[in-house]
Image (tube, rainbow, N blue to C red):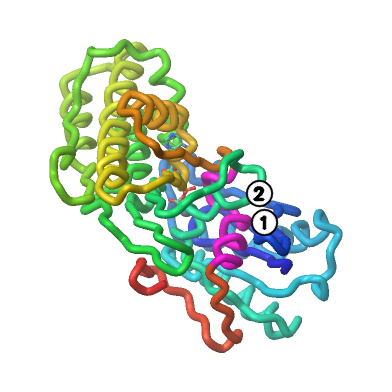
C-alpha cells in the first residue's frame, strides 16, 4: 500500500510518501517539511493567522515535491492520510481541505489521522529502531501542545492514561525560553545552553511527580523560573545556562518518573517517545540510565530527531496501522480532537 501523508496542524506544512510491505514494514519514500518557525521566531511565538497563511503558501508545492521525490504520479497512490486534529483551526483546514479536494479529484480514499497518534507512530517507520516494538507499550507524547501518556495494547487498543492539566512540556520549554530572552522555539535553545549550566545552582519544582495518577502540570515550573528572573536586573549568560539546566532537569525528572511508573504498573515491554521534545538528547539519555539503574526489562524507542517534530511520514504511518478509510465527504477539521475520539 502506498500512502500520501499530509500534516498542517501548526507551523509545519508537510507531506510524505510511505509504502508498506506484506509483512507490514513501512518504508519512507519521501518526506518534505516546510517550516514557518523562522517567521514565528520574530514574533516570539506562533500567531495562528500567520501560520495559516504560510500553510496556504506551501501546501501544494510541498505535496508536489513529495510525489516528485518519490518518482510517483497520483495514480500510484492508494490513499491520502491527513491530520484532522488536534491543532490550530486555520492551519488544519488548509491540509484537510487540500486532502479532500485531492481525494475527490484523484478518486482516492481518505484516512483522517489524529496528530498525536502520528507522533507515536513515527517509531514504526522502518529503520527508526533496530528492535521490534513489543506490546503492551507505553507511549509518551511530549510536544509543543501536548503531554500525554498512552497504554498501547495493540494497534486497535490504545488507552489514554493521563496528560497535562495546564502547559505542555514543549510549551514550558518555549515559555521559559521567552522569559530568558531566547529565540523561539525555546526547547532546542534551552537544551543547547543547558550543556554549559552548572548543576545544583538552581532547583525548580517537579509538579505532580509523586501523584498516583498519570497527569502532568508544568505551569508552576514556568512561574518558578519567572520568580528567579525577576530577582535579577540583568541575567548573565552563565546564570541563563544554569537556569536552563535546572528547568530542563525538572521536566526530565517528571516525564521519566511518570512514564516508568506506567511501565511498572502495566508491565509494558516498550516505551515509545514522540513529539518535538523527544528530540531532546538529555531526555533520551535519562530514560536509558533510569531503565538500566532499575534493571527494567523494557526497550526504549524514539524516532530520529527529524521525525520527532511535525512531519507527514508519521501521519501516513499512523494511517496505515489504523486504516480507517472514509470518503472525502466524511471528514472535517477537529481542532480539539482527543483520544477517545480516534
Ligand atoms: O511536535 P512538535 O513539532 O509540534 C507540536 O505538535 O506541538 O513540537 C514542537 C515543540 C516545541 O515546543 C519545541 O520547543 C520542542 O518541541 N522541542 C524541544 C526540542 N526540539 C523541539 N524541546 C526540548 N528539546 C529539544 N531539543
Ligand atoms: Zn506535533
In the figure, residue 303 lies in which quadrant? top right
| Residue 100 position by quadrant | bottom right
Q: Position of residue 297 (x, y in %)?
A: 39, 37
Query: Residue 141: where, in percent of width, then height?
Result: 40, 49
Picture quarter containing residue 185? top left
Crowd rating for badge 1 (residues with CA inside 10 Å; few <14, some 14–19, many 20+): some
| Image: 87 above or below 275 | below
Q: Secondary structure at mark 1?
A: loop
Whether residue 333 is in magenta: the answer is no
Instruction: Name the secondary structure under disc 2.
Output: loop
Work out how far the residue at label 2 is from the one at label 1, CA to CA, in angstroms: 6 Å
**Quadrant where the N terminus is found in the figure:** bottom right
Residues at marks 2 and 1 touching, judged by CB atoms closer than 8 Å:
yes
Disc 1 within 8 angstroms of ligand 2 (CB): no
- Residue at 30 percent across and 14 percent down: it is 239
Q: Position of residue 307 (x, y in %)?
A: 58, 45
Ligand 1 occupies quarter: top left
Left or right of 92 on screen, residue 171: left
Is residue 85 visible to us here?
yes
Q: Residue at x 63, y 74 (%)?
A: 99
x, y percent for residue 78: 73, 74
Q: With respect to residue 178, does 138 lie above or below?
A: below
Residue 58 appears anywhere in the view = no
Q: Main secondary structure of the magenta part?
A: helix
Numbered mark located on residue 126 in the image: 2
In the rendered structure, which segment of residues is drawn in magenta? 307-321
**Mark 2: few/some/many CA within 10 Å (<14, 14-19, 20+):** some
Q: Residue at x 43, y 63 (%)?
A: 88
Q: Residue at x 54, y 77 (%)?
A: 324
* Residue that badge 1 annotates: 25
Q: Of the numbered discs in the image, which one, if any, rests on residue 197?
A: none
Give the residue at the far bottom of this rendering.
Answer: 329
Amino acid at each position: 500500500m502506498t500512502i500520501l501523508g499530509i500534516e498542517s496542524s501548526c507551523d509545519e506544512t508537510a507531506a510524505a510518501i510511505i509504502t508498506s510491505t506484506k509483512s507490514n514494514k513501512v518504508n519512507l519514500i519521501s518526506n518534505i517539511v516546510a517550516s514557518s518557525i523562522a517567521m514565528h521566531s520574530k514574533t516570539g511565538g506562533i500567531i495562528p493567522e500567520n501560520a495559516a497563511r504560510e500553510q496556504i503558501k506551501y501546501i501544494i508545492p510541498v505535496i508536489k515535491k513529495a510525489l516528485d521525490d518519490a518518482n510517483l504520479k497520483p495514480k500510484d497512490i492508494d490513499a491520502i492520510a491527513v491530520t484532522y486534529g488536534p491543532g490550530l483551526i486555520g492551519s488544519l483546514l488548509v491540509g484537510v481541505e487540500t486532502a479532500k479536494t485531492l481525494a475527490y479529484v484523484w478518486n482516492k480514499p481518505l484516512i483522517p489521522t489524529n496528530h498525536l497518534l502520528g507522533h507515536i507512530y513515527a517509531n514504526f517507520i522502518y529503520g527508526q529502531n533496530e528492535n521490534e516494538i513489543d506490546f503492551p507499550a507505553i507511549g509518551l507524547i511530549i510536544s509543543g501542545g501536548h503531554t500525554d501518556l498512552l497504554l498501547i495494547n495493540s494497534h486497535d487498543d490504545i488507552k489514554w492514561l493521563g496528560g497535562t492539566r495546564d502547559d505542555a512540556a514543549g510549551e514550558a520549554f518555549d515559555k521559559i525560553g521567552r522569559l530568558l530572552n531566547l529565540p523561539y522555539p525555546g526547547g532546542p535553545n534551552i537544551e543547547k545552553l543547558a550543556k554549559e549550566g552548572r548543576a545544583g545552582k538552581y532547583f525548580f519544582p517537579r509538579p505532580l511527580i509523586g501523584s498516583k495518577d498519570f497527569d502532568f502540570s508544568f505551569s508552576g515550573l514556568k512561574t518558578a523560573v519567572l520568580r528567579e528572573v525577576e530577582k535579577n536586573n540583568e541575567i548573565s549568560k552563565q546564570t541563563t545556562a544554569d537556569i536552563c539546566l535546572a528547568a530542563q532537569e525538572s521536566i526530565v525528572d517528571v516525564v521519566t518518573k511518570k512514564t516508568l511508573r506506567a511501565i511498572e504498573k502495566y508491565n509494558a515491554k516498550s516505551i515509545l517517545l514522540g513529539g518535538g521534545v523527544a528530540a531532546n538528547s538529555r531526555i533520551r539519555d535519562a530514560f536509558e540510565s533510569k531503565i538500566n539503574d532499575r534493571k527494567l526489562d523494557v526497550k526504549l524507542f524514539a524516532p530520529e530527531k527529524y521525525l520527532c517534530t511535525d512531519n507527514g511520514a508519521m501521519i501516513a504511518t499512523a494511517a496505515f496501522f489504523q486504516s480507517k478509510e472514509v470518503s472525502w465527504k466524511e471528514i472535517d477539521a477537529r481542532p480539539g480532537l482527543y483520544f477517545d475520539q480516534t
